[in-house]
Image (spheres, grey):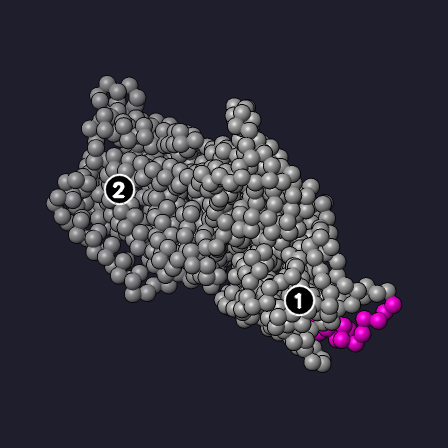
């Protein structure tokens, strides 16, 4: 630790005993590091569900019955649970690491010496010793100030430094950018400003995913449908074996139970949940290759659904730093030595960010010592230096806001034409979005820090302009989103006029910005303001969150970009939070996407990847949900008619793999640029349910025909094989329909599945494992007729569905 003896109003600070007493009372700067769900709660939520209980029970029963070949579905169920736990635990870890304070050490005054201690060891009433470049580690009240200024942009969004005089507060997480001083800690730990922001940000939530929500809804419906359908199937299986008593007495109940389990598992789209997670994961890997970090898999989908994009100006549209723009000379000869004066302002150790920008253009040779100087203050809006000769005329140079430095202080209106010229030029430059500063000279005048008063008359010398560096990719990216129908909102803590000027510079056709200090408290009125305005300035962190919520109440899907801690609450509230690489750690922790190289033009690529994921999952969902629909229809109709379920679980694994599982894996990863349209679940079900009913009707007709023929009825293996053949052909027909438009890759997948079907049906090893046999000729003809009839009905369905939901 560093120790240094000091003197002043707070010469001693706390004693060792005072510190120990406060620590024992819990008044230190440690913050509880917990999120809303523990690891056990995450496991319980993803594993111990009614749905998993049904699947797990079925898996165990088949193992006990010795039918391990029929228990392959257990692998998919386990995969779903593992992916869910891992995904949520990763989100929890990100939130647990959330930190607003980056400073590893704090500088405090204890027992009369300055000591550097860990941030967590700061206690209530500690005296912080603050210098330029320090991050404030706890909320504190300023005791003494020597030009102390704080940058609170990470907390409030206000990019201009805030002057901190004695009696004012400095907030934890802010940065000291000028001056020095001391401050007594008034709030620590969870009570500090930065910790309260972090606590709200740590509230656990998953990204709003239409695909995940739709799948969860389907699984919820199925969970409650499984039991009654299973009872219907169980009764049908037992009745088809001579009734309950006869089946139990003969031991036929075991095969009946296998049939019940087959019907139950067939209804569950296990592969769809797993495949969706795989598609999201592959999208995340692709994005990582483009320097975009996906912090939650479903966020890949997010930007494809967004219709409002809220942009924070600083760090998003701009690079977050001020750069020197140029010198604008005034009428008449310039005062000699002005370049030397600017060099001194740039090299001053207590220079603010604006003055430091001059360093590369104006050098200070150190040859002319300053008699006195006044550091910049955001309250005064100016700084000054006085020389007594030695290369420049004796007098004071003032650098500051034109309207302050050149104000008429004589009261007689005798400012002169030079002043009017300077103010006019500065005003015109400011209207174009540039930040303006004037350098003025007061001949023979000395300005001191003890009497920081401007002379009555000063002479304007030059006007300097500064600007925020616009990101080179900002205009092109905004044009892309406008072309795609995404509404843009620019939200910032800066002056609304400045924000509006920057927005115009990147191609937005807007008028004046809206001052968020005038935002209505009424939620309905706030929604109207958000609808009718594009640019907002002077926005507080809480207001950003409320503005996002207002847009969401209007039915919008909202993405929010940001880089400061002031953006954390809004990023958390938005449907999709996006952080830049330069963002504060807290901001990156809660964001769903992080642009690792800070390139704003990565976002269109994220949109394209999200579209590919959504469009392809919608395509394959029709395959899986068609299977769920026909499984329910077959189970219910066969059970009510007291017919045996026509498949073994392993036979369903055979047909699922050929018609759904393997081809859907390839379809989910292919290119697909279709524009997002809401209503994923409605479109999928409007095709899948009729398709499932067509399949069930075809199989029911085949089995009723077989039941009318005693020979066929005496050979259940032949009937099962004919049913497998019928289901496989219609399933491949559905695959061909949902794959359209067919290209070379899709056609190759379709032909490969057809070839595999022919090979497996004639391969002895496959016949033995899947319990298949070549049906007799009449059953083969019946299966062919049922399959072709079902396929033609699928074609008609596709035609009607395409007219209702055009691409």
- Residue span colored magenta: 412-428
Q: Report x, y in % for residue 184.
A: 61, 37
SS state under label 1: loop
**In the picture provided, is 252 more to the left or to the right than 478?**
left
- Front-most of residues 783 and 769: 769
Residue depicted at x 68% and y 43%: 166
Relative vertical location of residue 210 with respect to residue 739 in this rendering, above or below: above
Query: What residue do we see at 71% from left, 81% from top?
Result: 332
SS for callout 2 = helix
Q: Residue at x 65, y 38 (%)?
A: 9
Q: Quadrant of the N terminus?
A: top left
The answer to whether one can see residue 620 in this image is: no
The mark nearer the N terminus, 2 or 1, is 1
Residue 460, placed above or below residue 617: below
Distance from Cα at disc 2 to Cα at disc 1 = 93 Å
Q: Is residue 245 visible?
A: yes
Between 500 and 445, the one lying in front of the other is 445
Position of 727 with respect to 40 (left or right) is left
Q: Nearer the viewer, mark 2 or mark 1?
A: 1
Residue bearing mark 2 = 653
Residue holding disc 1: 388
How packed mark 1 is, by other alpha carbons closer than 10 Å (few <14, some 14-19, many 20 or more), is some
Q: Judge whether 417 appears above or below 398 on screen.
A: below
Residue 709 x %, y %: 24, 39
Residue 421 falls within the magenta-colored stretch: yes
Residue 623: where, in percent of width, then height?
A: 36, 49
Q: Nearer the viewer, residue 156 or 748?
A: 156
Residue lying furthest bottom: 332
Find residue 312 and report its image quarter: bottom right
Instruction: Report the residue at 41% width, 50% height from top.
Output: 294
């Amino acid at each position: 630790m560093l120790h240094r003896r000091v003197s002043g109003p707070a010469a001693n600070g706390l004693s060792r005993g005072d510190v120990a007493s406060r620590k024992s009372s819990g008044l230190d700067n440690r913050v509880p590091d917990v999120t809303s769900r523990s690891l056990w709660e995450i496991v319980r939520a993803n594993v111990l569900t009614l749905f998993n209980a049904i699947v797990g029970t079925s898996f165990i029963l088949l193992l006990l019955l010795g039918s391990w070949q029929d228990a392959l579905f257990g692998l998919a169920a386990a995969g779903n649970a593992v992916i869910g736990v891992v995904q949520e635990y990763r989100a929890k870890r990100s939130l647990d690491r959330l930190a607003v304070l980056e400073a590893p050490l704090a500088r405090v005054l204890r027992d009369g010496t300055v000591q550097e201690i860990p941030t967590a060891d700061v206690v209530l009433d500690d005296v912080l010793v603050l210098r330029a470049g320090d991050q404030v580690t706890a909320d504190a009240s300023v005791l003494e100030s020597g030009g102390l200024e704080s940058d609170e942009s990470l907390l409030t969004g206000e990019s201009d430094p805030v002057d901190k005089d004695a009696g004012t507060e400095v907030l934890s997480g802010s940065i000291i950018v000028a001056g020095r001083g001391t401050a007594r800690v008034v709030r620590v730990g969870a009570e500090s400003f930065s910790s309260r922001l972090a606590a709200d940000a740590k509230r656990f939530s998953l990204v709003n995913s239409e695909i995940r929500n739709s799948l969860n809804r389907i699984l919820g419906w199925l969970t409650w449908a499984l039991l009654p359908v299973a009872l219907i199937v169980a009764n049908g299986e037992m009745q088809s074996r001579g009734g309950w008593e006869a089946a139990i007495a003969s031991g036929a109940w075991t095969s009946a139970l296998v049939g019940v389990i087959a019907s139950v598992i067939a209804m569950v789209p296990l592969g769809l949940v797993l495949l969706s997670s795989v598609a999201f994961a592959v999208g995340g890997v692709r994005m990582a290759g483009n320097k975009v970090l996906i912090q939650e898999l479903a966020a890949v989908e997010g930007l494809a659904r967004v219709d409002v994009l809220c942009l924070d100006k600083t760090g998003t549209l701009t690079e977050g730093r001020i750069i020197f723009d140029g010198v604008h000379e005034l009428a008449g000869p310039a005062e000699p030595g002005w370049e030397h004066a600017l060099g001194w302002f740039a090299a001053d150790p207590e220079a603010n960010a604006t003055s430091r920008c001059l360093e590369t253009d104006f050098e200070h040779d150190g040859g002319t010592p300053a008699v006195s100087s006044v550091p910049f203050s955001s309250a005064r809006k100016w700084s000054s230096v006085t020389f007594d000769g030695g290369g420049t005329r004796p007098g004071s140079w003032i650098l500051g806001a034109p309207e302050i430095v050149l104000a008429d202080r004589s009261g007689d209106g005798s400012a002169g034409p030079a002043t009017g010229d300077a103010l006019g030029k500065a005003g015109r430059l400011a209207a174009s979005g540039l930040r303006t500063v004037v350098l003025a000279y007061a001949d023979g005048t000395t300005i001191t820090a003890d009497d920081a008063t401007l002379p009555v008359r000063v002479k304007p010398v030059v006007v300097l302009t500064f600007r925020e560096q616009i990101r080179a990719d900002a205009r092109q990216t905004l044009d892309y989103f406008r072309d795609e129908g995404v509404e843009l909102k620019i939200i910032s803590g800066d002056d609304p006029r400045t924000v509006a000027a920057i927005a115009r510079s990147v191609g937005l056709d807007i008028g004046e910005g809206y001052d968020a200090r005038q935002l209505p408290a009424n939620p309905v009125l706030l929604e109207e303001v958000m609808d009718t305005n594009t640019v907002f300035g002077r926005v507080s962190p809480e207001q950003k969150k409320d503005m996002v919520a207002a847009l969401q109440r209007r039915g919008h899907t909202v993405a929010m970009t940001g880089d400061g801690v002031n953006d954390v609450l809004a990023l958390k509230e938005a449907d999709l939070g996006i952080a830049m690489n330069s963002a504060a750690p807290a901001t990156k922790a809660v964001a769903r996407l992080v642009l690792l190289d800070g390139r704003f033009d990565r976002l269109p690529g994220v949109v394209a990847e999200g579209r590919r994921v959504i469009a392809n999952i919608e395509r394959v969902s029709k395959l899986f949900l068609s299977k769920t629909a026909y499984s329910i229809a077959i189970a219910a109709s066969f059970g009510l008619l007291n017919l045996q379920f026509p498949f073994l679980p392993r036979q369903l694994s055979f047909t699922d793999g050929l018609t759904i599982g393997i081809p859907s894996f390839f379809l989910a990863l292919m290119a697909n640029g279709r524009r997002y349209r809401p209503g994923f679940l409605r479109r999928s079900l409007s095709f899948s349910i009729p398709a499932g009913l067509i399949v069930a009707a075809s199989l029911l007709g085949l089995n009723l025909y077989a039941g009318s023929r005693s020979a066929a009825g005496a050979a259940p293996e032949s009937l099962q094989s004919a049913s497998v053949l019928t289901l496989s052909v219609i399933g491949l027909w559905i695959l061909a329909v949902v794959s359209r438009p067919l290209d070379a890759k899709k056609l190759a997948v379709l032909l490969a599945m057809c070839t595999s079907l022919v090979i497996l049906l004639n391969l002895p090893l496959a016949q033995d494992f899947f319990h298949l046999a070549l049906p007799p000729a009449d059953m083969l003809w019946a299966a062919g007729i049922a399959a072709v009839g079902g396929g033609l009905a699928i074609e008609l369905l596709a035609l009607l569905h395409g007219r209702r939901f055009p691409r």
